[in-house]
């Protein structure tokens, strides 16, 4: 009985430590113990103890002037290992860079995780004004072109669960009607690409196409994102370049039935 309780305690501690590390974001890179305790619904003593353990291994660092914690260099080491071993990054990099050189806008590789689209790789354009995205950033699936492409090729239960959780309206153009979303996804699957026009962020547009693995299954998306005043996501020339990039990456992954 004692061993079982100790095992459960250790598992709970590991889970809480991971939740703490995941709570740091680009927008909030530093947090106090009280902030973390409140947001995670944990005791201050528990958070303080876990932060001390994480700090001893270099996963977090405390700012002595503000008493706030931030992620440490040990996280960077793990990130390097992960990103260097993601097959899609290696197979897509030269194609993504060529795409960015041609369209002069920022390009992303993304994957679906739950009800979010997560960016795995990014190549920035050279314009002084760029869209603020980063590797690891999560965006709502129904308000992005990448998300629509990935969702369009998922099973009905995935779409149903998303709709059941509610379609939040981020902008006036965000799709919040379930039937409208289903119609949009059917069109995306039929035409082979998706667009987003100021559906997540004001003034931001994008176009995406599906990337398939060696079995023909859609597993990633490639997208180009830019400001509305500079980019038209419905431009056939742009759409064709994105579709071609998706096809070329798919072939690198072993898919010849695109």
Image: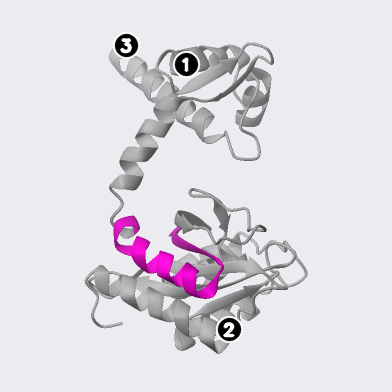
- Asked whether residue 95 is drawn in magenta, I would say yes
Residue 60 position in % (x across, y down): 50, 22
Q: Quadrant of residue 153?
A: bottom left
Instruction: Name the residue tied to disc 2.
Output: 183
Q: Residue at x 30, y 14 (%)?
A: 1
Instruction: Name the residue tied to disc 1.
Output: 55
State the CA–CA distance, disc 2 to disc 1.
50 Å
| 85 sits to left or right of 198 | left
State the CA–CA distance, disc 2 to disc 3.
56 Å
State the CA–CA distance, disc 3 to disc 1.
29 Å
Q: Name the residue nearer the viewer: 175 or 158.
A: 175
Q: Which residues are the magenta region?
A: 89-115
Residue 214 position in % (x across, y down): 23, 71
- Asked whether residue 99 is drawn in magenta, I would say yes
The earlier-in-sequence mark between 2 and 1 is 1
| 256 sits to left or right of 129 | left
For the question of whether residue 61 can be seen, the reply is: yes
Mark nearest the camera among 2 and 3 is 2
The earlier-in-sequence mark between 3 and 1 is 3
Q: Name the residue nearer the viewer: 256 or 240.
A: 240
Instruction: Name the residue tied to disc 3.
Output: 2
Does dot 2 land on a helix, a strand or a loop?
Answer: helix
Mark nearest the camera among 3 and 1 is 1
Q: Residue at x 63, y 58 (%)?
A: 131
- Quarter of the image that includes the C terminus: bottom left
On residue 86, which mark appears? none
Residue neighbourhood size for the residue with mark 2, other residues' Cα within 10 Å, grouped as few (<14), some (14–19), many (≥20): few
Q: Is residue 172 above or below residue 51?
A: below
Q: Name the residue nearer the viewer: 210 or 50.
A: 210
């Amino acid at each position: 009985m004692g061993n079982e309780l100790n095992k459960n305690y250790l598992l709970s501690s590991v889970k809480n430590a991971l939740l703490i590390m995941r709570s740091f974001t680009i927008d909030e890179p530093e947090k106090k113990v009280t902030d973390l305790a409140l947001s995670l619904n944990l005791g201050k003593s528990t958070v303080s103890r876990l932060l001390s353990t994480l700090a001893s291994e270099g996963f977090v660092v405390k700012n002595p002037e503000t008493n706030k914690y931030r992620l440490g260099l040990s996280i960077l080491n793990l990130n390097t290992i992960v990103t260097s071993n993601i097959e899609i990054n290696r197979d897509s990099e030269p194609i993504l860079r060529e795409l960015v050189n041609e369209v002069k806008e920022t390009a992303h590789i993304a994957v679906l995780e739950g009800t979010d689209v997560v960016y795995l790789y990014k190549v920035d354009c050279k314009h002084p004004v760029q869209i603020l995205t980063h590797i690891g950033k999560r965006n709502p699936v129904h308000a992005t072109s990448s998300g629509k492409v990935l969702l369009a090729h998922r099973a009905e239960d995935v779409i149903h669960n998303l709709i059941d959780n509610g379609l939040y309206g981020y902008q006036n153009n965000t799709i919040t009607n379930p039937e409208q979303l289903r119609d949009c996804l059917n069109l995306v699957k039929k035409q082979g690409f998706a667009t987003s026009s100021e559906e997540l962020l004001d003034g931001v547009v994008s176009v995406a196409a599906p990337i398939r693995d060696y079995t023909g299954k859609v597993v990633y998306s490639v997208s180009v994102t830019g400001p509305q005043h500079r980019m038209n996501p419905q431009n056939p020339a742009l759409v064709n370049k994105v579709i071609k990039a998706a096809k070329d990456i798919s072939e690198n992954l072993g898919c010849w039935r695109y």
